[in-house]
Structures are given as structure tokens and as C-alpha cells.
Image: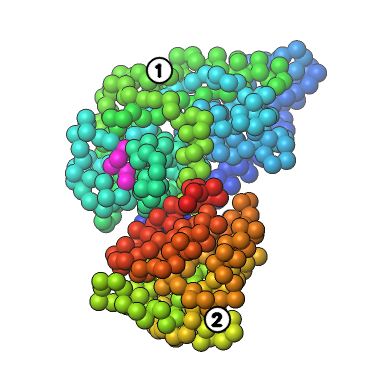
């Protein structure tokens, strides 16, 4: 998956649930909901037999399946319609797509009853016309469990209960130094949404906050799960520092109930957390199905089912802990402070921030090797070209294997075009040359050997050509951009002027298919205003580096620009 650092495959990642597991679950659901279950004897006198289709989150699905069995033990007839209940485990994001109509209208296999982990999913589904028409705006809660930060007991540097903060999720703020963070992808689980919302709330807004959010996402993403995090698959860790994990409290209860050598400790942030409320939602507009759903709800609220939920580690819908929960090691029994802020715009913003920052990159890099690059960097005992070489190598280390990168070198010494198109756009992890060498290794070798060719940069001509190249082969599933490493001077070497380039970029820039320019110029720039206008024409940025140590921050800041494209200000 895309990430902000080049790492070895995550040791926790391989143990977490994969998308294939969810595909299999969906196929099981489709089979269950579309194949008639023989019940001819019982329903022989019915005018019609219908199936109450129930989709539930993984953690609560067993309870729904048991209740469906009890429902089917009675004669369920509603105005001549006999109803048979079928319950299955289905990931909430899949059901949300079904009940909100998906891309082509309401699905034929959408459930009649939906029990996701959080009302956040219900709110997302109600954004659509079909969802707003059929889904209850105020669903009933079956149980609750707060989202917590979990760590093994004895983890170095864990704060006291009153000092726990969402801030500790950020890289550099985690107790005991560098350690991974495991959480569910915000597109797949409300606990991940809660973490994103909490970190954004702590950071606030503005360029610096966006840069810090970028650092968080790119650090967390390698260990992100595609579904409910299985604590047994994360802990214990065979080597290295144990990760922090963002989990429902119920998952900590379940893990500690197996009596591990090192139990987990649930940490409750002082700023408040989100309570997962497991809403019972009727999604059908058919009166018989809604009445049948009400009868199923009545079964679920009887004492045997409420007691089973307590034994599974859930709290009451109001957050009260049962007597059984109060005796669980690592859990704080008193009701934690919760808030209902993960709604509306905040909910959508959390998911959109994650998606923009974690989407793979596709960038054509332009490296200026003209005579201007031979000059020393102001006040430094190094040349602009040496810093460009360093920037190229750092950039390669920051991007993951699924990044598509290409490289052009700029100098009029390369001929009439003023450039050498060294490498076209291709995945860094691709090894398609026959000798096993990856594209990353090839580009690293090229970056190490970059030398000045002299001549003029033909900077403006090459920027326009690069922007047209990336735009013409635009990919919807990636962030498309042009990165320019330059001395920052065209020197009149191009056929077009800076103003003509700005006009051409403004004319061709498509907000629906944005290709953004990130210009990194080294040293004091006589063309700074022109370069800033050129970048701004594509919602991009100009960064002027006087210190080689600034380069990493500049790359990170450029990546954070994704959060505002295509509507970024200057």
C-alpha cells in the first residue's frame, strides 16, 4: 500500500485481514440472500414467502444469527406474507454501498436489517437519495463500546490514565519512541475514522497542520488493516517495539479474556472518544419487512441476548459497564467521556483526508542539469546540482513501490527539445527489464550519477511538455503531478515566456483531472515570482531551498497539498 516511507513489508500487515476475506464474505452473503431456503412445509399455507435479510458487523454477527434462528422458530406471518430470517456477517462499507443505491441504483441483495458498528455508517448511507428515503434517521442501539488506544501492559513510556491523549498516535509522540501504529482503514471501519478525526482535531487547520497530518497518514498506512483488527494477529510481537493499536474496547476485552502472557491495556484519551453504538437499522420500505424487523428487535432486547452481549465485552447502549466488564484486566469500568462529533462534514472530511493522502502518486520528475546548476548554494560549501542529486535520492526513498515515477533531465545540450527523457512513467517496484533490477534501483543509480551538462535549461518549454505528457495519460486512481528540481532560472532559453506558460497551464488545467506542479528551486531566485505564478496555475507550490536539510520537509509539505487540490490558494 502507499506510504510515506520506504519500508520492508510490515510484520503486522500480513497477519491482518485482507480484502479477499471481505470478497469471500460478500460472496457468501450473495449466495445466502439469493438462493431460496426450502421451507415449503412450514410455509405451505402462505400466500407469499419472503426472507428478512440481515447484514451485521463481524463482532456482533453471531448474536444476530442466533436471534434469526429464534425468529424462525415461530410462525412469522404478516398480512399473508410468511417471513424467514437470514443473518450474515458483511463489512459495513459494502452494505453502505448497497443500501445507498451504489453506482447503478439500489441493489437486489441489499439487506432489510443492517447492524453496522457505528451510526457513522448510517449517516454516510443517508447522504444518498435512496438511503434517505428508506433508512431510519434515529436507529436503535443494541450495545456500545468506546474506541480506545491499546498497548501491551508494561509498554515503555505509557502515560498515566489522566494524561492519555490522541496526540500519542502521531509519529514522534508515541510512548517509548518509534513504534508502529495499527488501525483499520477509515474507509473500512469507524475506529479508523475516529482516529483520523481525533488527530485532525488536535492538529487544527493550516499548512503546518496539513503537513503534520500528511506525516501521520503516511506513517500509519503501512500497518493499516482492511477490516476489524484482530488483536490476536497483532500481539504478541516477535521482535521490535510493540505497536499501538486503535481498537474497540470490546476487542481488548476479548484479547485479555484468552489470558495472554502480556495483556493489553485500554487507554482512554482525555479529549474524549467515539462510542461505537451498533445501531439496528431497518432499510426496507416494505411494511411487512419493517414489522418483521421490529419483532427481531424485540427478540434481541430480551435478557438472554443482552446477557450474551455483556459476556462478549460490550457495554450497555448508554455506555454503562456490566459487572462482568468491571472485572476485566486492562479496562476502566467507569463510562469514558465520549462525543458525537464524528458526523456530517467531519465524518466525510476524515475519510477524504485519508484517501487523498494515501492515494498512490504518479509523478514526472524534471531535473535541471544546465549551467546554472554548477553554482554554489548560497552560503553553503555545495553546488545546486549536488543538492538536486540529494533531493532526487531522498524523493526516491520517500515513495513506495506502487508509485509511478518518470525522469527527464533538462539542458539545451541534449538537442532541440532541451531535455533527455531518461525514464518514462512506471512503477518503482516494477522489475521488467529482464535482469531483476527494479525501476527504483535504476533511478537511484541515475540520481547518484547526475552531472551538469551545461547549456541552458529550456525550463518553461519542458514544464509545459511535462504537464501535457502527464495530463494526456492521466490516471484517476492516482495523484498526478510534475516535480521540478531546478536552479529556478530559464534565462530566456525557452520558446515561450513565463506569462505564456502560465496562460497555457491555466487554459489546460482541468479541476476534474488535476495535474499539479511542485517546483523546488535551489538558492536565491531572480525568477521567484514567475515560478510561483507557474506553480499556482495548477494549484501547486514553489519551494525555495537554501538548506539541504529542508528538502524532506519540502517534499512532505508538497504531498500535503493534496488536501486542497484543485482549489489551493497561492
Q: Residue at x 51, y 33 (%)?
A: 345
| Camera sees residue 357 | yes
Residue at the extreme right of the image, as rendered = 47
N-term-proximal mark, 1 vs 2 = 1
| Camera sees residue 32 | no
Chief secondary structure of the magenta span?
A: helix
In the foreground, 104 or 471: 471
On the image, the x and y values in percent for residue 409 come to: 49, 78
On the image, the x and y values in percent for residue 22 come to: 55, 45
Q: Give the mark toward the camera: 1 or 2.
A: 2
Q: Residue at x 30, y 50 (%)?
A: 171
Task: Name above or below for residue 479 compared with residue 123.
Answer: below
On the image, the x and y values in percent for residue 133 come to: 67, 24
Q: Range of the magenta residues?
A: 166-170
The residue pinned by badge 2 equals: 418
In the foreground, 563 or 92: 563
Q: Residue at x 47, y 68 (%)?
A: 484
Task: Name above or below for residue 502 compared with residue 487.
Answer: above
Asked which quadrant contains residue 392, the reply is bottom left
In the foreground, 464 or 6: 464
Q: Residues within 10 Å of mark 2 (few under 14, many from 20)?
A: many
Task: Name above or below for residue 423 compared with residue 335.
Answer: below
The residue pinned by badge 1 equals: 318
Q: How many numbered callouts?
A: 2
Task: Name above or below for residue 281 compared with residue 125.
Answer: above
Q: Secondary structure at mark 2?
A: loop
Amino acid at each position: 500500500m502507499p506510504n510515506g516511507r520506504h519500508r520492508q513489508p510490515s510484520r503486522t500487515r500480513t497477519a491482518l485481514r485482507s480484502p479477499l476475506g471481505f470478497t469471500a464474505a460478500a460472496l457468501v452473503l450473495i449466495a445466502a440472500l439469493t438462493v431460496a431456503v426450502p421451507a415449503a412445509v412450514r410455509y405451505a399455507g402462505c400466500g407469499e414467502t419472503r426472507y428478512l435479510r440481515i447484514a451485521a458487523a463481524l463482532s456482533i454477527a453471531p448474536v444476530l444469527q442466533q436471534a434469526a434462528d429464534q425468529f424462525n422458530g415461530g410462525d412469522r406471518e404478516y398480512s399473508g406474507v410468511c417471513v424467514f430470517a437470514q443473518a450474515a456477517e458483511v463489512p459495513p462499507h459494502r452494505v453502505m454501498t448497497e443500501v445507498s443505491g451504489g453506482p447503478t441504483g439500489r441493489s437486489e441483495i441489499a439487506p432489510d436489517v443492517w447492524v453496522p458498528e457505528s451510526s457513522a455508517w448510517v449517516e454516510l448511507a443517508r447522504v444518498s437519495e435512496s438511503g434517505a428515503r428508506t433508512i431510519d434517521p434515529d436507529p436503535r442501539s443494541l450495545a456500545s463500546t468506546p474506541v480506545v488506544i491499546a498497548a501491551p501492559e508494561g509498554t515503555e513510556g505509557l502515560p498515566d490514565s489522566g494524561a492519555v491523549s490522541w496526540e500519542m498516535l502521531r509519529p514522534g509522540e508515541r510512548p517509548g519512541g518509534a513504534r508502529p501504529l495499527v488501525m483499520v482503514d477509515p474507509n473500512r471501519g469507524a475506529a479508523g475514522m475516529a482516529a483520523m478525526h481525533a488527530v485532525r482535531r488536535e492538529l487544527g487547520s493550516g499548512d503546518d497542520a496539513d503537513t503534520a497530518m500528511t506525516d501521520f497518514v503516511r506513517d500509519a498506512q503501512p500497518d493499516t488493516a482492511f477490516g476489524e483488527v484482530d488483536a490476536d494477529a497483532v500481539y504478541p510481537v516477535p521482535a521490535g517495539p510493540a505497536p499501538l493499536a486503535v481498537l474497540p474496547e470490546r476487542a481488548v476485552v476479548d484479547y485479555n479474556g484468552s489470558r495472554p502472557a502480556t495483556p493489553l491495556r485500554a487507554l482512554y484519551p482525555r479529549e474524549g472518544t467515539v462510542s461505537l453504538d451498533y445501531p439496528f437499522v431497518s432499510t426496507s420500505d416494505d411494511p411487512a419487512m419493517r414489522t418483521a424487523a421490529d419483532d427481531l428487535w424485540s427478540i434481541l432486547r430480551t435478557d438472554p441476548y443482552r446477557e450474551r452481549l455483556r459476556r462478549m465485552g460490550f457495554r450497555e447502549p448508554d455506555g454503562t459497564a456490566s459487572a462482568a466488564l468491571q472485572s476485566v484486566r486492562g479496562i476502566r469500568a467507569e463510562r469514558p467521556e465520549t462525543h458525537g462529533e464524528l458526523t456530517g462534514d467531519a465524518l466525510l472530511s476524515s475519510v477524504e483526508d485519508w484517501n487523498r493522502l494515501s492515494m498512490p502518486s504518479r509523478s514526472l520528475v524534471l531535473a535541471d542539469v544546465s549551467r546554472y546548476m554548477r553554482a554554489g548554494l548560497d552560503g553553503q560549501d555545495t553546488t545546486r546540482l549536488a543538492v538536486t542529486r540529494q533531493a532526487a535520492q531522498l524523493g526516491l526513498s520517500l515513495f513506495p513501490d506502487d508509485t509511478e515515477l518518470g525522469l527527464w533531465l533538462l539542458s539545451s545540450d541534449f538537442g532541440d527539445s532541451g531535455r533527455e527523457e531518461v525514464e518514462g512513467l512506471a512503477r518503482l517496484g516494477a522489475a521488467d527489464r529482464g535482469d531483476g533490477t527494479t525501476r527504483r534501483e535504476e533511478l537511484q543509480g541515475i540520481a547518484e550519477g547526475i552531472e551538469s551538462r551545461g547549456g541552458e535549461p529550456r525550463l518553461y518549454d519542458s514544464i509545459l511538455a511535462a504537464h501535457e505528457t502527464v495530463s494526456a495519460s492521466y490516471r484517476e486512481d492516482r495523484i498526478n503531478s510534475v516535480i521540478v528540481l531546478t536552479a529556478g532560472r530559464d534565462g530566456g532559453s525557452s520558446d515561450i515566456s513565463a506569462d505564456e506558460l502560465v496562460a497555457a497551464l491555466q487554459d489546460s488545467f482541468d479541476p476534474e483531472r488535476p495535474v499539479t506542479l511542485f517546483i523546488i528551486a535551489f538558492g536565491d531566485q531572480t525568477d521567484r515570482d514567475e515560478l510561483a505564478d507557474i506553480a499556482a496555475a495548477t494549484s501547486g507550490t514553489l519551494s525555495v531551498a537554501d538548506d539541504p536539510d529542508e528538502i524532506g520537509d519540502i517534499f512532505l509539505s508538497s504531498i500535503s497539498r493534496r488536501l486542497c487540490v484543485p482549489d489551493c490558494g497561492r
